[in-house]
Amino acid sequence: MLTREMAEHIVRETMERLHRNINMMDTDGRIIASGDRSRLGERHAGAIEAIRSGKPLLINEANKDLWKGSQCGINIPVLFHQQIVGVIGITGQPEEVSELGALVTMTTELMLNQAFLLSEKEWRNRTKEIVIEALIQADFDSRKVDERLQLLRLQLEPPFYVMIIRTELTLSYNDPLAAAIEDRLGGTQALVGVFDTHRLFILLSKCEESRRIAKLERIAAELQQSGLPYQIGCSLQVTELASVHIAYQEAEAALRYGSPAAPWNSYAGLEPQTIVHASDDATKQRFVNRIFPDISEQSVRTLQVFFDCNLNIQEAAQALFVHRNTLIYRLKRIKELTGYDPQSFQDATALQMAIWIYDPMQIKE
């Protein structure tokens, strides 16, 4: 538990406050950190005795010859979880340093506790990262994943949903945003971790549709309140951990093809669009060239607003800030140019597919 780096940190911090030489010994009585670097690596007989007895040892001029390698001062066992993990020594006359012993010991044990909590947090976050990396692959070692989930004390049960939060904020693997969302979702039934520098991965477990939407809205509201720019993509439901990689791809697709203005996008409403984009590039390009041989930016926008308004001419005209007759003229012109009638469901479907995959760079002004 007591590493050399930790011991050096304790010695440095304590010496700055007390202006006295401090030694830190491991459980073998060897000096692993000291203000007097010439003593590093020495065996400290006084520390060995303090470990054996479990009590502080005062060394003065009268008894220091009994403790080889020791100087006047006090040596106090350092406890962590009721176990001696080392000894801290304060050099000086016993009558001067003995009253400092309790303060130094308390400070040292607090620093050890802080270091332990930090290392445990880092371990948890790194373990979650490993589990997430495994789950988003089509093939993974389920036994190892189960073991790590048990170590994390996570109880993941179906049904599952994957959510991905994308933000402009640069995230680290121990980011407080992940911890806050995990607390909000209930720590034992959600796996939350930083997936890359701008994305947070969330696996909701034992979550029915109504609860999923409530949790999603809660997270969106909290992010909105924080003022962070963000987007959330959510998958469909899957019923086993082996299918989480599919849910992950769906959440990514929801981010990619969803509305940037919406607080969150679900794959459920974007399936047709995703299926269209799954086609190979040559097929998509040929389709677009056939549907849109010669089209303007205004025509593409007119079509999309018209489709967003469910083919309702009055609503679309209001959304476009044009007269109803102007919209009707535009739709008629599009039919003449493309051969597809935007007011016909069958033709509108083809036109919508073309808009989804159309390269904006090819739109004519």
Image (cartoon, rainbow, N blue to C red):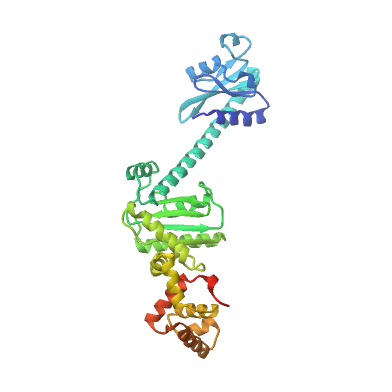
Quarter-of-image position of residue 350: bottom left
Task: Kindly identify the residue that appears in the image at 50 percent across and 38 percent down.
Answer: 119
**Which image quadrant for residue 270?**
bottom left
Task: Give the image location of residue 197, x and y in percent.
Answer: 53, 51
**As drawn, 313 above or below 86:** below
Quarter assignment of residue 207: bottom left
Instruction: Residue 154 in the image: state x and y as whole percent.
Output: 38, 47
Could you tell me which residue is drawn at 62 percent across and 9 percent down?
Answer: 62
User: What residue do we see at 40% from left, 56% from top?
Assistant: 248
> In the rendered view, does 352 fall on the left or right side of 62?
left
Extreme residue toward the right, this view:
19
Which x, y percent locates residue 242?
Answer: 33, 52
Please name whichever residue, 130 or 52, is drawn nearer the observer in this view of the structure. Answer: 130
Please say whether residue 205 is visible from this viewpoint.
no
The number of numbered discs placed on residues in the rendered structure image is: 0
Q: In the visual, does 274 lie left or right of 159?
A: right
Pick whichever, 112 or 328, lies toward us: 328
Answer above or below: position of 224 versus 26: below
In the picture, measured across the screen, residue 150 lies left or right of residue 24, that is left
Using residue 34 as the reference point, say whether residue 242 is left or right of it.
left
State whether residue 363 is above or below residue 38: below
Q: Residue at x 51, y 35 (%)?
A: 113
Q: Nearer the viewer, residue 365 or 137?
A: 365
Q: Examine the rendering and report whether any part of residue 202 can be seen.
A: yes
345 vs 283, nearest the viewer: 283
